């Protein structure tokens, strides 16, 4: 038990080593950078706007680089134009101004005066790409820049190669009754889902299938897919039977502590984790990984933080 607790403390410490602050002494990197390595494909899914009460502590005025900032009391109807920049590896794992952990792989952003947390629609005016992010940090503090995007958001908007981009920022405000306003637009009442307004058999079938879908299964709704040929169907079946590569971290007997450790490792390495029970022992593993090279790199990283028994294993696809 003590060994496992030490592992958990180690993971927490590591994720705290690596969001947006002026005191550079907190960080192990002097210059910001993209992620050194990540093991899975980024989904780049927009943040989902919802009602969240503002944190009172985030209304306090503050001073950075000799300039005084007063946060807004409400973001409803707010929009602005300017430049977007991004921040990444240097701040990954540190506390944001909102008291959360900065995750450069999540759709988040920093703003100087928006109430925290806020949701905003960001449009790259140079290429018309758009995303929705959750603002949970303060910054950027360079002249002309109005928003600092997470690495994932910058990747989706194609800002990584240019460093900055001309953007339009529109707050997506949702009140307690679900009424939504985007920027200075008119309020929009919550919409009735089409499946309820005009039900039909296909919509009902898809809805029923969706209720049975879990994150673990990741089952595609085949009822919504077009017919495929017998040859293609056989190829899909064969592809699903391909073996998968995992990295087994260690084996433990306590399910609660294994769950906590797996969550820490999944966050640290941005890869799925599970712990199947085999012969009354929980085998903590990470994956599946795309290839043997990624598995070997992950094993090296795990050994560098004390998991000397980590090894690669091949498991058949479900």
Image (tube, grey):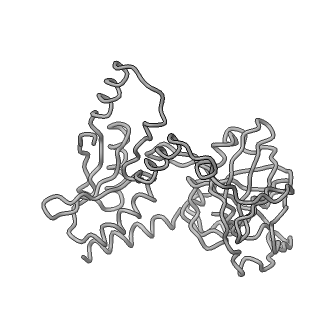
Residue at the (86%, 73%) spot, across then down: 68
In-front residue for pair 9/178: 178
In-front residue for pair 254/197: 197
Q: Is residue 98 above or below residue 217?
A: below
x and y, in percent, of residue 23 in the image: 67, 69
x and y, in percent, of residue 93 in the image: 54, 63
Q: Is residue 32 visible?
A: no
x and y, in percent, of residue 111 in the image: 75, 62
**In the rendered image, which quarter is residue 119 located in?**
bottom right
In-front residue for pair 248/217: 217
Quadrant into which the N terminus falls: bottom left
Residue 132 horizontal side relative to residue 282, left or right: right
x and y, in percent, of residue 60 in the image: 78, 80
Residue at the (26%, 36%) spot, across then down: 243
Quadrant into which the C terminus falls: top left
Q: Is residue 313 above or below residue 278?
A: above
Residue 225 horizontal side relative to residue 298, left or right: right
Residue at the (39%, 69%) spot, across then down: 10
């Amino acid at each position: 038990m003590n060994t496992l607790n030490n592992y958990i403390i180690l993971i927490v410490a590591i994720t705290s080593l690596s969001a947006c602050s002026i005191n550079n002494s907190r960080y192990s990197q002097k210059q910001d950078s993209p992620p050194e390595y990540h093991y899975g494909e980024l989904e780049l899914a927009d943040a989902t706007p919802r009602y969240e009460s503002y944190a009172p502590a985030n209304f306090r005025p503050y001073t950075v680089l000799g300039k005084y900032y007063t946060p807004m009391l409400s973001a409803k109807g707010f929009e602005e134009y300017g430049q977007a920049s991004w921040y990444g590896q240097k701040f990954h794992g540190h506390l944001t101004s909102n008291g959360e952990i900065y995750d450069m792989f999540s759709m988040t952003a920093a703003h100087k005066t928006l109430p925290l947390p806020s949701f905003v629609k960001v449009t790259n005016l140079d290429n018309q790409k758009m995303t929705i992010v959750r603002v949970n940090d303060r910054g950027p503090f360079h002249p002309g820049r109005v928003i600092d995007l997470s690495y994932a958001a910058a990747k989706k908007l194609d800002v990584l190669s240019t460093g900055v981009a001309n953007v339009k920022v529109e707050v997506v405000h949702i009140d307690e009754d679900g009424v939504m306003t985007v920027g200075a637009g008119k309020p929009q009442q919550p919409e009735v889902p089409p499946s309820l307004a005009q039900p039909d058999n296909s919509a009902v079938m898809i809805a029923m299938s969706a209720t049975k879908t879990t994150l673990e299964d990741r089952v595609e709704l085949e009822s919504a897919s077009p017919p495929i040929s017998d040859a293609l169907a056989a190829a899909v079946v064969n592809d699903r039977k391909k073996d998968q590569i995992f990295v087994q971290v260690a084996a433990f007997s306590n399910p609660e502590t294994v769950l906590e450790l797996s969550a820490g490792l999944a966050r640290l390495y941005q890869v799925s984790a599970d712990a199947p029970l085999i012969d009354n022992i929980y085998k903590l593993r990470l994956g599946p990984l795309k290839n043997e090279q990624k598995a070997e790199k992950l094993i090296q990283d795990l050994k560098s933080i004390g998991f000397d028994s980590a090894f690669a294993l091949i498991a058949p696809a479900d």
